[in-house]
Amino acid sequence: MRTLSGAAIAAAGGAEVLSEGPRGGPERAVIDSRSVTAGDLFFGLPGERHDGGQFALEALRRGAWGVLAGPQWVREIVEMRKRGVDEFDGWVMASADPLPALQGIARRWRRELGCAAIGITGSTGKTSVKDVCRALLPARVHASPENYNTEIGLPLAVLAAPEGTEALVLEMGMRGAGQIAELCEVAEPDVGVITNVGPVHVELLGSLEAVAAAKAEIITGLRPGGTAVVPAVAGPLEPYLAGASGLLRFGDGGDVYAEETSTNNGATDALVATPAGEQRFRFPFTEGHNLDNALAAIAAGVALGMPLDAMAQRAPRITFSRLRGELVRLPRGTILINDCYNANPVSMRAALDHLASLDVGGRRLAVLGDMLELGPDAARYHREIGEHVRAIGVQVLIGVGELAADYAPDLRAADAAAAAEALEAELGEGDAVLVKGSRAIGLELVAERLEGGDPGADT
């Protein structure tokens, strides 16, 4: 943001300048006053417990380039400066609603960058597609860090993009109607990827069709001439695709698909067909769902005119974010699939299929937590996952939480700590275990205990 002046920032955010500060723009945007360092622009956002504006003075004392907060907080700061009560050097800006101001400033920076932008949403696989795009695209890519995919996180991700960025890759989360549209107003994507539509947030939105409608907001939010990237079998998304000016489908039967595949030594070799031609890729994974994620990312690259051979050269560099299908080899030949970031019926089935595909010397075990926000059909979804566990030959199923009773597990655990103890008693030499559940269940504790020691060791 260094090329944006204080006046330009205030104008973009619709904020009132109460006091001017240094020439030139800020280094970065932050919302936590405790992390402020010299050169930062601090946004005092209202929260459930505290209004961040009350920490604006602390941010200035830490050397902030400037602060933007509610008038009730920053007017007092300016009066203190005038009276000589406190000395600091920084811009002071007032906004009745700092969140739209943050979003407006991020939109201005996105336009200042003048680069292509890819927005990624979907019931599962958003982060993985983002990770693949970051690795594959032959450009200076800036991607959303961690889970910066909300109305606050996405603009912060945009504002963190350095000058010279050639492609923004932005994850877009959704918990209600209108939220993807709000994110698109900031990101103005050239390409909108919808990974899939599944029964996630049905409890909030009421039906799978409502989930599809909310995800489809990314199609209407594209810049003129933009391209929607969707699964070949779009299901409930299909009614919304006629509104896309450009459309690429990925997966079997689509525009971007794998003609030939083979797996060996932990990698997948694929001949990928696209409207721009064919290209051989070697991916550092063997899971079928990650091949779909890679095809979605390749389709996004094709939509932006990226050369296939350049993307293929980068494919071996793909790495995935933590807690999302991490394959960890432990002592005594045991294998952990750490996929405990979140869970829903689509991602749960894919993770179980990954477990079933592993070549193991011992047994296959699964520690599965509740899948939350599935609405009135939650019990049925859990029963179907339990049936799938049995169908693919997983020998031991440990269910964690109240809803997990519908998995019909071999063992029940009330919480993650109890699940870790139950797994310790079961895990043996050469076994493979999947740990997965909704984030609120906290199954990372189970994975951390496995990685921190050798629960399968004889005692």
Image (tube, rainbow, N blue to C red):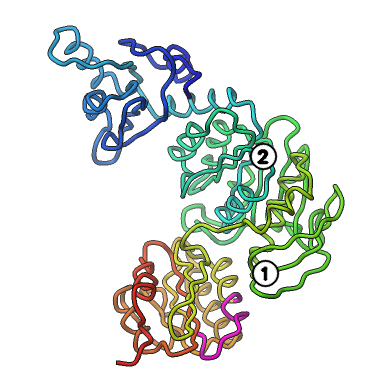
**Quarter holding residue 235:** bottom right
Of 271 and 191, which appears nearest the observer? 271
- Residue placed under numbered mark 1 in the picture: 267
Part of the protein shown in magenta: 353-364
User: Mark 2 — residue?
Assistant: 139
- CB under 8 Å between discs 1 and 2: no
Q: Which mark is residue 399?
A: none
Q: How many numbered marks appear?
A: 2
Q: Is residue 225 left or right of residue 31?
A: right
| Residue 95 painted magenta | no
> Would you place residue 66 above or below residue 390 in this image?
above
As helix, strand or loop, the secondary structure at mark 1 comes to: strand
Tag 1: amino acid: Ala
Does residue 111 sit above or below 335 in this rendering? above
Q: Percent position (x, y) of residue 325?
A: 53, 67
* Quadrant of the image containing the C terminus: bottom left
Q: Position of residue 330 (x, y in %)?
A: 44, 78
Whether residue 357 appears in magenta in the rendering, the answer is yes
x then y, percent, for residue 382 = 49, 75
Q: Which amino acid does label 2 sit on?
A: Ala
